[in-house]
Image: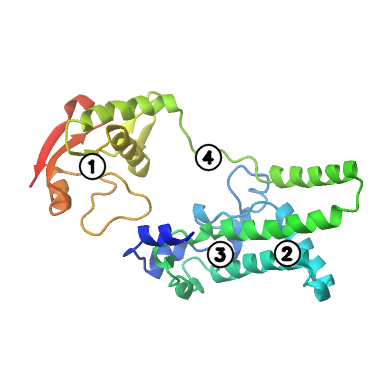
Amino acid sequence: AVFLPYLVVNWGMSREYTDCATLIPVPGSWLTGLPGTPWYETLEPYRKDTMFECLLFSGFGIYTLFLATTLYLLWHIRSLRNPEHALMAAGLITAATWFALTLTFEEGGESLWRYVRFIPGGTAIRCVSRVYVTVYLFGTLAGIVWLARVTAPLQPRLRTLVLALIVAVLIYEQTGYQPPSFDKSDFYPIADRTAEELRKADAGYVVPRYTDPKGVTMLGVYADVLGMWGGLRANIPVVNGYSGRCPDGNYPHDVAATDDMLRDWLTGKFRGKVAIVDPNHPTGTRFIIVE
């Protein structure tokens, strides 16, 4: 039931192994984090040409937690039937399994993902490196259970202090990165003006280029977000909508589509009036008819 919506949405969609090969983690991916984080420069030798989506390092603290939990379980190998020990083992095994199944030793090289991707829904996945969510989720779960067990005998105040220090280290090692962002005030007014023009037709296409009030020019996929948001505001379908993959056919992605390109793409899929809106010149909206 949890995976059913994903399977339905991706029904009929698939990728070749080559489509995602450069987005599969290499060993160095797990030792290099995002720009600005505490260890980014120190671990530069491991970064090389690793794709941005494959910078998966979240600090030595969390790895120490994984290692300590593993050593603890090995020391108590005969008591794995204990529910807590069993949960720790399950978490670590799950994390290690997905680490191994999605690892390649050179960018674009071979990995077990070539075969694992045939699990239902797997062929629709492009950014395999997002497996870090699963690895850290289950590994951290195991570590939390271990921490709860080994700190249980401590006095409440001492236990709180110890756990607080551990949490502080884990959080600190993941700070410093500033995600790309923009002010809402620089975006929504443009989206609203775009929506006003889109409402004049049955569907729309928003030129994937705009300049915000601060003079920053957005292109490609970032400008596509404006097109999608304008469509939502206007409550009409828009051609814009690239998010990691393109539909079959001559989909006009990452270019300012011509009238002929739009007609070619929409013919057979849609009939009606299409508004072509340039966010930088909303009053110059043009219209085409698709039969």
- Residue 215 placed where, x, y %? 38, 26
Chain-order first, disc 3 or disc 2: 3
Q: Secondary structure at mark 3?
A: loop
Foreground disc of the pair 3, 4? 4
| Residue at mark 3 to residue at mark 4: CA–CA distance | 23 Å
Chain-order first, disc 1 or disc 2: 2
Foreground disc of the pair 3, 2? 2
| Residue at mark 1 to residue at mark 2: CA–CA distance | 53 Å
Identity of the residue furthest to the left in this view? 291
Q: Nearer the viewer, residue 270 or 15?
A: 270
Q: Nearer the viewer, residue 14 or 19?
A: 14
Q: Which mark is residue 26?
A: 3
| Residue at mark 3 to residue at mark 2: CA–CA distance | 26 Å
- In the image, taking residue 184 as reference, residue 196 lies left or right, namely left
In the rendered image, the vertical position of residue 277 relative to residue 134, given as above or below: above
Which residue lies under the disc numbered 4? 179
- Residue 43 placed where, x, y %? 65, 54
Chain-order first, disc 3 or disc 1: 3
